[in-house]
Amino acid sequence: MGDDVSIIDEEGRLFGVINAVDAVVVVFALAFLIAGVSLVYGVGPEPEKSSETRYVTLDLGEQPTYIADRISEGEILTADGRGNRSITDVYRTRLDGNPHVFARIAVNGTVTEDRFRHAGEPLRLGRELTLQTESYETQGQITAVDKVDSTLAVTKTDVVVRTTLDTSDAEQLSFGDQYRLGESTLATVRTIEVYGTQNPDRRLAYIGLTYRTYEPSGTPRFGQTPVEAGATLPFRHSSYRFDGTVVRLGTVEPRGQRRTREVTVELEHVEQQTAAAIQVGQSETVRGETIADVIAVDQTPSTVVVTSDDGEVLLREHPTEVDVRVTTELAVRETALGTQFKGQSLRIGEQIMLDLGHIMIRPTVVDVSSE
C-alpha cells in the first residue's frame, strides 16, 4: 500500500496546494457569482403560476348558415388538441346575406406575474382566435376580454319604424309576426298602423317592433347597425319583408294619443261629375280600421274673374265647376308638436290625402275642431 495522502497537510494547505482559508473564500465568491447570473438572466425557480378562466367576445362576422347553425352554447372547443375552450353564449343576426355571429367563449389559461396567457400567448384585442370542433372550424376577432360574465350583452330594444308596403303585404301584417333565424327570434311585431297613399297599390305603415339587440358599448346594435333614430332596420317574414326607418326609440307606440277630430277640408274648381262622387257616409278604411268618415258635403259654384268690355273686373260663377267643402271625422294622434294625421302634421292651409274607395281626393284643410 502506498503512502497515505492527507486532505490538509501540516502547513494547512488543501491537497497540499491551496490554503484552506483561501478555498473557503473562493467557494463563497462562486456562490455570489452564480446568484448574480441567475438574477440577470432569469436562471432559477420559475415564477408561480395559477390557472384561471377569462371570457372572450369574438366577432365571427358573417358565417355560412351551415356553420352559424352549429355554433351553440355549451359546446366544448379544442385548441392544440386540448379541450380548454367552451362557448357560453351566442348572438346571431341576419340582414340579407349570411348570418352574422357573435360568441362568448370561456378560455382557460395561466396567470404568471399578473399576465394571463392562453396556449402560451396573451389574449389581445384584435387577435384572431380559432373555434374548432369535430364538425366545423372558423375564426373570429377578439373584441373584449373579461374576468367575469359568461353572457353577451344581449337585450331587447323597442322601436317604431316607418315604411311603405305593397297593399297585399300590408294586408298580411299581423300582431306577433316574427323575424326568425333558425330557432332564434330576431324581432317581433307589436303594433301596426297602416294608411293609404296616393298610389292605391302602396300603403304607409308605422310598425312597433321589439328587436333582439347586442349592446357592447351603450348603444344597441342589430348586427352591425346601431339602433338609433334614422337607422334602417330589416324585418323578414315568410309572407312579406320590409326595411323600416326608425322614427321612435324605447317604445312600440307611435307618438301621441289617438283621438277623433272633426276636420273641414275643401276642393276648389272641381268638375260637377267629380263633386257628385263625394258623398256623406263614405270612409277611408285600411285593414278593417276606419281612419276617415265623410259626415257632410256642401257644394257652391266656383267663381272666376272676368273682364267686361269696358275693362271692369268682375266675379262670375263658373258654368261647370264647383267648390266642395267636406266635413270629416279623422282618426288622429295628438302630440306635443300638434295634431297628426297619417303620421303628418295636420295644419290649416295644407293638403291631406283621402282614399274614399272609388274616388281619391287631395283637399286643403280649412278648419280643425278644438275638441
Image: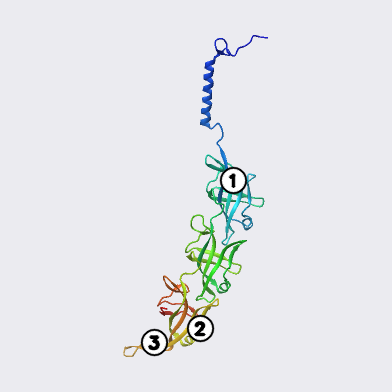
Number of residues whose C-alpha sits closer than 10 Å to that of mark 3, classed few (under 14), some (14–19) or many (20 or more):
some
Q: Which is nearer the N-term, disc 1 or disc 2?
A: 1
Coordinates of residue 322 in the picture (x, y in percent): 43, 87
Coordinates of residue 158 in the picture (x, y in percent): 51, 64
Number of residues whose C-alpha sits closer than 10 Å to that of mark 1, classed few (under 14), some (14–19) or many (20 or more):
some
Discs 1/2, front: 1
> Which residue lies most toward the right here?
1
Q: Which mark is residue 108?
A: 1
- Residue 366 seen in the figure: no
Residue in the image at 55% along x and 13% along y: 13
Coordinates of residue 332 in the picture (x, y in percent): 46, 75
Q: Is residue 132 above or below residue 290?
A: above
- Residue 32 seen in the figure: yes
Q: Is residue 194 above or below residue 309?
A: above
Query: What residue is disc 2 on?
Result: 282
Q: Which is nearer the N-term, disc 2 or disc 3?
A: 2
**Location of the C terminus (image quadrant):** bottom left
